[in-house]
Amino acid sequence: MTTEADSAAEFVPASRSLPTLRRAAEGCRGCPLWEDATQTVFGAGPRKAELMLVGEQPGDREDVEGEPFVGPAGGILARALEAAEIDRKDVYLTNAVKRFKWRARGKRRLHQTPRAGEVEACKPWLQAELKAVRPTALLALGATAARALFGSSVRVAHDRGRLIDFPLAPVAALTLHPSAILRLKDHDEREDAFAGLVDDLRLVLGATGSR
């Protein structure tokens, strides 16, 4: 394992073109996660998307396919978007960290939460995406994305359900990550958490005036 670099900033081009940023991200060595990941999983969606969703990091399926939110958590998110009457094709989807962090258990690759230094190292890519897309509404999915975007003082349990001041988007908020809903064993708890995710999607889109 190589020594972790302080930041991916030196790998981020000045261009605001998403294809250019995506190609450049493939060669990023800003943190050691590139060594064990199959590939970089950059954001996906329209260049002028009104709504941008930011998750934690790619999962196993995303790492293999090279696209964000195509695994089980992505299925939950797709259902929530449909319930909120939001077309997924109109949304820009990305993650705070662009590569899959995992540990082996037999033949399985188990998700590991990125460390604060890894999130910080990848932040220049997220900032470049925000400046390229310039979304009207931004929703952080889970604690890692919330910390990357809003800092450590913002907490999902405390700040969910309200709008947050953020310089790179007129409307911003945070919610549960869809993977947290998947982990709930109780059916009623799972349904309540899913309904909360739908409500939070409606909150940010409604605050833009489009609803």
Image (spheres, rainbow, N blue to C red):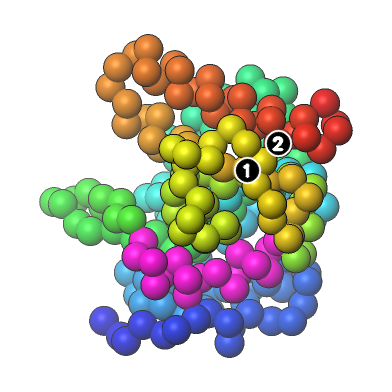
Q: Where's the C terminus, which quadrant?
A: top right
- Badge 2 crowding class, 10 Å Cα cut-off, few under 14, some 14 to 19, many 20 or more, is many
91 relative to 183, above or below: below
Residue visible at 46% across and 46% down in the picture: 155
Element on which disc 2 rests: helix
Q: Could you say which is closer to the camera, residue 38 or residue 190?
A: 190
Q: Which residue is mark 1?
A: 173
Work out how far the residue at label 1 is from the one at label 2, CA to CA, in angstroms: 7 Å
Q: Could you say which is closer to the camera, residue 168 or residue 112?
A: 168
What mark, if any, has residue 109 been given in the picture?
Answer: none
Residue 13, percent from left and from top: 69, 81
Q: Is residue 19 left or right of residue 104?
A: right
Residue 132, percent from left and from top: 77, 64
Q: Could you say which is closer to the camera, residue 92 or residue 134?
A: 134
Residue visible at 69% across and 52% down in the picture: 165
Identify the magenta region.
Answer: 114-130
Q: Amino acid at mark 1?
A: Ala
Residue 157, percent from left and from top: 44, 37
Element on which disc 1 rests: strand
Q: Please, what is the dominant secondary structure of the magenta stretch?
A: helix
22 relative to 188, above or below: below
* Res 24 quadrant in image: bottom right
Residue visible at 42% across and 85% down in the picture: 5
Residue visible at 73% across and 60% down in the picture: 167
Q: Which residue is mark 2?
A: 204
Q: Amino acid at mark 2?
A: Val
Q: Is residue 188 left or right of residue 53?
A: left
| Identity of the residue furthest to the right in this view | 209
Q: Is residue 102 left or right of residue 178?
A: left
Q: Where's the N terminus, which quadrant?
A: bottom left
Check contact, mark 1 vs mark 2: CB within 8 A: yes
